[in-house]
Amino acid sequence: DAKTTQPNSMESNEEEPVHLPCNHSTISGTDYIHWYRQLPSQGPEYVIHGLTSNVNNRMASLAIAEDRKSSTLILHRATLRDAAVYYCILRDDYGQNFVFGPGTRLSVLP
Amino acid sequence: GAGVSQSPRYKVAKRGQDVALRCDPISGHVSLFWYQQALGQGPEFLTYFQNEAQLDKSGLPSDRFFAERPEGSVSTLKIQRTQQEDSAVYLCASSLDPGTDTQYFGPGTRLTVL
């Protein structure tokens, strides 16, 4: 699986939007971009995923660059509950397990 | 509905003891994964089952680690002769479809080897 690069940590103020970047310059055409997050003392949970087009769901939006070498997870209004480690992962259609990196630790300030 | 459950949530073992960690996946989920997460790091893949078949065990760190899923539902990860470096959180995940489907993770078992 191709590698992703994320900042180690980010801070946000409560109720403001958060943009979490991910670089994946070696992405292949069949790689899906997945985002999971891990709240303290819990297992990772699914946030969103996409292939080429931008995606929206109730939790977040995923903006994918036109060349697919980078993507951004957007939390529209951060809450204290969004404080977590966010993982950006590439996996192709035939992949099974996820290969996690260290992720981005998001802190949300009240 | 019920998510993935794991037991025990915490386990303390003396070095050299054997431990067994249990995972109850979401009912009907074909695929089951085990991951190991050291403190401050992302989860690392250990092994993968499709129904009762163990299709990939490339991530198991040594032959002291053994996993099974005999009836294609509940899975057990066994670690023999535990060592201090085995201390970690062990996460189980299941998914309906092995390919593109979302993985649902349990809360993990925190293993501490003294």
Image: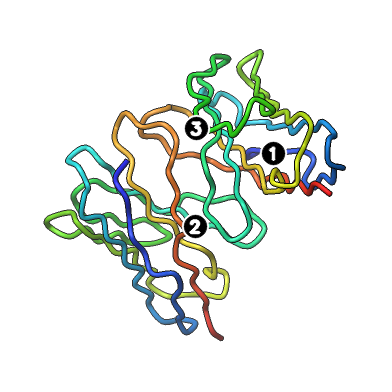
Marks 2 and 3 sit apart, C-alpha to C-alpha, by 17 Å
- Residue at mark 2: chain: A
Marks 2 and 1 sit apart, C-alpha to C-alpha, by 18 Å
**Badge 2 is on which residue?**
A37
What percent of the width, then of the height, locates residue A102?
47, 58
Rate crowding at label 2 as few (under 14), some (14 to 19) or many (20 or more) other CA atoms within 10 Å: many
* Image: B114 above or below A1: below
What percent of the width, then of the height, locates residue A107?
52, 76
**Badge 3 is on which residue?**
B95
**Badge 1 is on which residue?**
B5
In the image, A28: left or right of B62?
Answer: left
In the image, B75: left or right of A70?
Answer: right
Going 54% across and 51% down the picture, which residue do you hit?
Answer: A44
Going 45% across and 53% down the picture, which residue do you hit?
Answer: A36
Quarter of the rendering containing residue A41: bottom right
The quarter in which the N terminus of chain B is drawn is top right
Tag 2, which secondary structure? strand
